Image: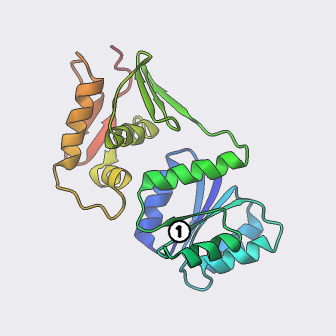
Amino acid sequence: MKILLAEDDARLRKNIVHILKKEYHHVYDVGNGQDALDSTFSESYDLLILDWMMPKLSGLEVCQQLRQTSFNGSILMLTARDDTADIIKGLDSGADDYIVKPFKMEELLARVRALLRRKDRVIEQVIQVDNLQLHVDSRVFLHNNTEIDLTKNEFLLLEYLFLNKGRILTREQICIYIWGYDYEVPNNSLDALVKLVRRKIDGSQAKSRIQNIRGIGYKLRENNVS
């Protein structure tokens, strides 16, 4: 899928781009509304993710101008405004959905998947690594075709590792995915979560599926069948 993200918060923009690219989307990003509008004239996008408050043109103005043209892609608004009147204003301007800041990355991904499904696009729903299967939309995890009971955060940890199988993920990247970009959790929360997940998926294996990369983070170990 081809997605354009317009967000003036550089850190948040970087994190969202990283997450979306791991779901195999082609993601382009800009830092203001005018650049977003200009980009739609030269590229065709399946989805626009627009921050409401941006320099030069607001997300609302971009949305209104695009809906007056032939643009027929989906539009998701990011906003700190949670007042009902503002939400209605955004939707009436042509947005298909909205998400209120601060938000968790899992919610953003769920809304992106839902908007793209409405366009009858095919979205990857099952990720398989050896004898493990992760079903993204139904939130089911299978080991040798047997469902493993996971908590919400345990599933999110595995989901992020599976989306990035074979890649090293930093502790910060993983924490942002699980607890949101403004997360405040104890330093050992991630390690404790990894320990719980290992107990559920490793069984009698000598080496854990979740490999610790000292001083950096974790990665999913492949070709480790048992």
Q: Position of residue 118 (x, y in %)?
A: 70, 48
Residue 174: x %, y % from top left:
33, 49
Asked if residue 60 is positioned above or below residue 159 in the image, the reply reads below
* Residue drawn at (20%, 35%) of the image: 195
Residue drawn 33% across and 54% down? 179
| Residue 20 in view here | no
> As rendered, which of 131 and 88 lies closer to the eye?
88
Relative image position of residue 78 (x, y in whole percent): 53, 68
Label total for image:
1
Q: Which residue is mark 1?
A: 78
Question: Foreground residue, 185 or 226?
Answer: 185
- In the image, residue 205 sits, relative to residue 34, either above or below, namely above
Where, by quadrant of the figure, is residue 132 drawn?
A: top left
Q: Residue at x 35, y 50 (%)?
A: 178
- Horizontal and vertical percent position of residue 57: 62, 83
Q: Is 190 on the left or on the right of 17, as rendered?
A: left
Amino acid type of the residue tagged 1 in the rendering? Leu
